[in-house]
Amino acid sequence: MEEVVDKCASMLLSSSPEAMTASADFFKGLSGDPSGRCSEGLCFSSVLQELLAYERGAIFDHLLRQMLADPGNCGEMRIQKLYSCKILATFSESEAVAKYCAKDKQRARSLLKALLEAQAYLLHIIRGQLREGKPNQEFEEMVKRDKGKGRHEFLELALENIKAFASFISASKHFRLALQQSDCFFRDLESLVARNITKRASAQLQQKAVKNLCRLLHSLCRFGDTKDWAINSGLVRIHAAVTRLMALDGTKVSEAPIVCSWEKCDEGSELDAGRQFSKCANCSLAYYCSKEHQKLHWSVHKKQCKVKTSDPAPQSG
């Protein structure tokens, strides 16, 4: 274990883009193994926890600094920044790592800023590829580094960042509150999963999009301090995009988690409850585990439902 951790730490603390991409590939393979073990037989979560403890969080502090660095016009630094986000997204699957990276208000805000900037840049490049039909300088660099993967590499990076958003939303109230101040999160997310982008992706990436979006939706709906904000800001449109992606050939992923719309419900998801929840009979966009919770949620939901606010609460569908 110690030898592997020291080797990983050396790569992650390096300022070399080659080392960053090599470490990203290593951890991608490790996290993707169904057994959660690498060739040395080490558990993924154990490696992450050892890396977190390495020099009292030095590795993750370094990654955060790289994510926040201004790359200017330097393509190498831009790639390094993007891969720092990718690595942190993989590491954020560990609750301990996610909590450490967003443990206070300032760190949560900085982390959110870095992720939003990365997503905005990636979306800009992806749109440019579709519009121009030819690679730009950064795209060519990606092709050189990832032979055979360059075509979809920017989209894959953006989808990995969605996983990071989900992890940090679940781990940190500071991150959730900071996210609610963003006016671009749902707008950029909706653009990323738009039909003209996702229809060109491989089946594997379509599956990853569904998986990570489902995880994000579940994280947003778990907490009362984000659920209503998310519903008001565009969650329903993202859910529609997930449904569309699930219908594409080759995409076989379980249904997006559905939870009771009343923020104080502790029933969990439909999967947790072992049954389907009822829908609002008027809009079919709000879900309830019971008629009682539907009535309790009506004071909030009536503002969004397509009925007059003076109407009585609708019955379960």
Image: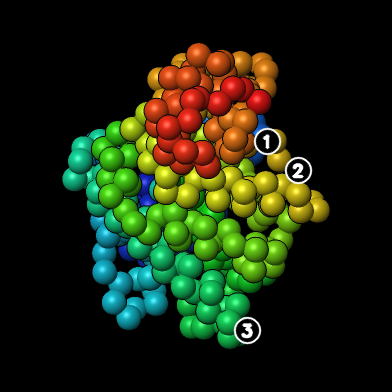
Between 266 and 153, the one lying in front of the other is 266
At label 1, counting other C-alpha atoms closer than 10 Å, the crowd grade (few under 14, some 14-19, many 20 or more) is few
Secondary structure beneath dot 3 equals loop
CA separation, marks 1 and 2?
Answer: 9 Å
Residues under numbered marks 3 and 2 in contact, where contact means CB atoms less than 8 Å apart: no
Examine the rendering and report whether any part of residue 89 can be seen: no
Identify the mark nearer the N-term, 3 or 2. 3
Residues under numbered marks 3 and 1 in contact, where contact means CB atoms less than 8 Å apart: no
Examine the rendering and report whether any part of residue 295 can be seen: yes
Between 296 and 238, the one lying in front of the other is 296
Kind of residue indicated by mark 1? Glu
Colour setting? rainbow
Mark 1 sits on what residue? 255
Mark 3 sits on what residue? 133
Compared to residue 9, the image places residue 314 above or below, namely: above
CA separation, marks 3 and 1?
Answer: 34 Å
Compared to residue 29, the image places residue 284 above or below, namely: above
Disc 3 versus disc 1: nearer the observer = 1
Compared to residue 100, the image places residue 208 above or below, namely: below
Q: Position of residue 202 (x, y in %)?
A: 71, 61
Secondary structure beneath dot 1 equals loop
- Left or right: residue 193 versus residue 225 is right
At label 3, counting other C-alpha atoms closer than 10 Å, the crowd grade (few under 14, some 14-19, many 20 or more) is few
Mark 2 sits on what residue? 252
Instruction: Say which residue appears at 66% left-offset and 26% top-offset.
Output: 317
Instruction: Say which residue appears at 62% left-offset and 66% top-offset.
Output: 197
